[in-house]
Image (spheres, rainbow, N blue to C red):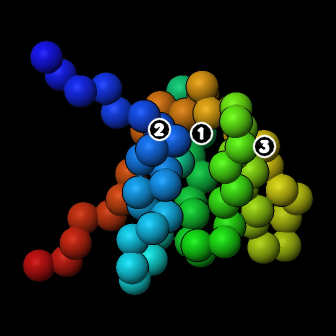
Amino acid sequence: MSEEISIVGELHRVLELRPFKPFVIVMNSGDRYEVTGLHQVAIGRSVIVLMREGENSMFLRISQISSLEMPEPAI
């Protein structure tokens, strides 16, 4: 039986990595949002708030997030 991966659980996991590692939030629509800092994301019940320097905050529905992408480590 395969284990279901929760987007919220995965968000918490990547935000807890030390040192912090940038990642990309990929939406069902194909839109992509880069997270470059630990305090750039706030997680609510059904939305996350993405704060981007010099821009308005964005509210992203958790149900519309398709995946999180982390860059491959350099070898």
Q: Nearer the viewer, residue 6 or 33?
A: 6
User: In this picture, is 29 found above or below 41?
Assistant: above
Asked whether the viewer can see residue 58, the reply is yes
Q: Is residue 14 left or right of residue 32?
A: left
Residue type of the residue flagged with mark 2: Ile
Tell me: 42 left or right of 63: right
Tell which tag, 3 or 1, sits nearer the viewer: 3
Residue bearing the label numbered 1? 31
**Which residue: 59% across, 74% down?**
37
Residue at x 49% of width, y 55% of height: 12
How packed mark 3 is, by other alpha carbons closer than 10 Å (few <14, some 14-19, many 20 or more), is some
Q: Secondary structure at mark 3?
A: strand
Between 46 and 75, the one lying in front of the other is: 46
Residue shown at 68%/67% (left/top)? 40
Q: In the rendered image of this protein, does residue 56 appear above or below residue 25? A: below
Q: Quadrant of the N terminus?
A: top left
Q: In this figure, what is the number of numbered marks?
A: 3
Looking at the rendered structure, the kind of residue marked 1 is Asp
Say whether disc 3 or disc 1 marks the residue closer to the N-terminus: 1
- Residue at mark 2: 7
The reply to whether discs 3 and 1 touch (Cβ–Cβ < 8 Å) is: no
The label nearer to you, 2 versus 3, is 2
